[in-house]
Image: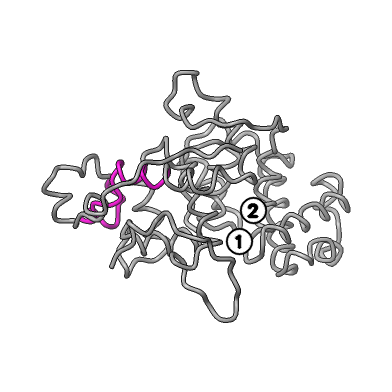
Amino acid sequence: MRKQVGRKRNPAELKCSPAKLLKSGTVINLAVNDPYPNHPRPTSEECRAVRDDLLAFHGFPQQFVKYREQRLKLLPDEDEYRSTSMETAVSSKESVLDGLVSTILSQNTTDANSQRAFSSLKSAFPTWDDVLAADSKCIEDAIRCGGLAPTKSSCIKNMLSCLLEKRGKLCLEYLRDLSIDEIKTELSQFKGIGPKTVACVLMFNLQQDDFPVDTHIFQISKAIGWVPLDSDTKRAYLHLNTRIPNELKFDLNCLLFTHGKVCRKCIKKEGNQQKKETSSCPLLNYLCT
């Protein structure tokens, strides 16, 4: 995959203080739900610069290509988002229910383990009706490789049961016709489905402009000054969704997530966990000193 070349930027223009950014009039259209209305970063220009630099460094992450392709199909040919398009493989669209269960299985485990757990679950139970009818212990055995099997099994069974009771069938495709707020309300009613899971389904499976905040993205956002150091993930989610332009959210999220998994300069090493470090970091000019 051909990588794009990003232009080098003057560190001085990247690390403006909040006071300078406010004085320059960069901050506009702040949403009322922004928990940090006086924190004017990131600007649209910063978001685009980080997106471009990470894309030039990593290329677009292969694991997210199929979702990007689905988003591109929904846009007109002249849309700006297509300016960073690349070759993609044709893929079948994942159902919303598949996406939700896959996201549940991805919690607190590696990508490889969650994918194995999902494949094992689908192999053992061809339909979601089969999953709902199955004994919890059988579901646990099928997804054990993904970790936290009892908790995730209970969450999936509860979600399917509530969905069947409410809608009469195990299908979430009706969410495609709802607004973002309505989707959040619908999914949040299921026990064990938190804001990050909802945001992931919104972005990946419903092609909505949302910006999930996982541990990697949260830590990088603090490191480059996009959220205050005393922020938590919930407030970071609200702030970043307010500040980041909709047309950049998907690419930027996928790239920050990917970068956070491999760069120790941006993500602090915890415990004995080993990380493969990149040879250099394209975000060095953005890091707060």
- Furthest residue toward bottom: 271
18 part of magenta stretch: no
Q: Earlier in the sequence, mark 1 or mark 2?
A: 2
Q: Residue at x 64, y 46 (%)?
A: 63
Query: Badge 2 is on which residue?
Result: 103
Q: Quadrant of residue 95?
A: top right
Query: Badge 1 is on which residue?
Result: 192
The amino acid pointed to by label 1 is Gly
What main secondary structure does the magenta stretch of the protein show?
loop
Binning the other alpha carbons within 10 Å of mark 1 as few (below 14), some (14 to 19) or many (20 upward) gives some
Q: Which residues are magenta?
A: 31-51
41 left or right of 112?
A: left
Q: Horizontal and vertical percent for residue 32?
A: 27, 47
Binning the other alpha carbons within 10 Å of mark 2 as few (below 14), some (14 to 19) or many (20 upward) gives many
The amino acid pointed to by label 2 is Thr
Q: Horizontal and vertical percent for residue 254?
A: 53, 48
Q: Horizontal and vertical percent for residue 30?
A: 25, 44
- Furthest residue toward left: 23
Q: Horizontal and vertical percent for residue 199?
A: 51, 49
Q: Residue at x 71, y 45 (%)?
A: 98
| 240 vs 176, nearest the viewer | 240
Q: Secondary structure at mark 2?
A: helix
Q: Quadrant of residue 235?
A: bottom left
